[in-house]
Amino acid sequence: MTDKPAPPPTRRMRAEALLVRGLLSIFRRIGPVRASNLGGWLCRTVGPKLPVSRIADANLRLVMPELDAGMRRRVIRDMWDNIGRNAGEFPHLATLPHNPASGPGWDVVGEDHLRAQEARGGAAIFVSGHIGNWEMLPPAVARYGLPFSSFYRAPNNPLVDRILRDLRDQAMGQPVPLFAKGAQGAWGALAHILRGGRLGMLMDQKMNDGVAARFFGQPAMTAGAMAAMAIKLRCPVIPGYVERLGPARLRIHVHPPLDLPAGDSRVQDQMELTQMVNDWLESTIRQYPGSWLWLHRRWNVQLPEYMPKK
């Protein structure tokens, strides 16, 4: 039995792809700094007015109640600014220089952990979140001889998906396997790790079939595949994130591998490791709240944009 061919793209899909190509072309032509500034201005001007920003505000009221309304507005504005800058910088990731004296580019704090892993070889799991320009993390790590595969949720528009995947491959310098979210993707990722491959995971996304770890003091369904693979194979789990220093100027922070639990219960060890990663993510987000993506319904609670205003 063969898979059915994909339906042809609709007019709307073609129009969306044309718009994306046009924006990326503009961003590419004007250079990384002006592209970052333009993307940031567009998103921070329009984004806070969109209905989805009410989810961000409700999330902030839930888990950072110490922020008043003005502070929440600032975080949401900064979040949109970061999203826009990421879009503007996206077509430039392949050409941003490493360790520039000034101007656009990227550097690494903790590169000794990358060099140690490259020398050690074998399987490894890199964990991060939607912090700063998270798209820079895979190509930066790849420059140290450690290209990794990732879980991936494709856009609904296959034409836009192809555009974005081509740009990611250019930034990586090579195509890398991507695994669909869900059970089938998890089995593919496990096979990849068993072959000594490396895997990157954004651990701040809600997984309805995950485990109920705590995040900012609230229960949050969290992917359990990372901990299950790491505990089973005893492979390093290396946290890292991207700090934004300025327009198209990024700093990758790489932390030492986490100490894997070594208890008597594999299930308990997996839960402990998952919680360890959530705690690390929370502490990082609290440092840079305007750099995180607050737009998802991350917690296992009702979030009325619905909650009474304060």
Image (spheres, rainbow, N blue to C red):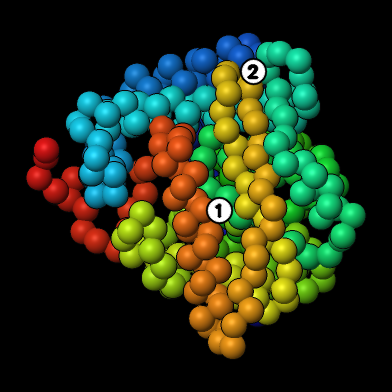
Circle 1 is placed at which residue position? 202
User: Can you say which quadrant of the picture contains the N terminus?
Assistant: bottom right
**Residue at the location (70% across, 27% down)?**
106
Q: How many marks?
A: 2
**Please, what is the three-letter code of the amino acid marked with disc 1?**
Leu
Residue 288 placed where, x, y %?
45, 35
User: Can you say which quadrant of the picture contains the C terminus?
Assistant: top left
**Please, what is the three-letter code of the amino acid marked with disc 2?**
Pro
Q: Decide which of 85, 279 is in the foreground and name it.
A: 279
Question: Going from the N terminus, do you reach mark 2 or mark 1 first?
Answer: 2
**Residue at the location (14% across, 48% down)?**
307
Within the image, what quadrant is residue 181 found in?
A: bottom right
Circle 2 is placed at which residue position? 32
Q: Decide which of 53, 61 is in the foreground and name it.
A: 61
Within the image, what quadrant is residue 273 found in?
A: bottom right
Left or right of 221 on screen, residue 182: right
Marks 2 and 1: CB-CB under 8 Å?
no
**Residue at the location (64% across, 70% down)?**
260
**Residue at the location (60% across, 67% down)?**
226
Q: Secondary structure at mark 2?
A: helix
Residue 108 placed where, x, y %?
72, 35
Residue 3 placed where, x, y %?
62, 70
Left or right of 23 on screen, residue 177: right
Q: Is residue 55 above or below residue 103?
A: below
Residue 182 visible in rendering: no
Q: Secondary structure at mark 1?
A: strand
Q: Is residue 105 above or below residue 237?
A: above
Residue 193 visible in rendering: yes
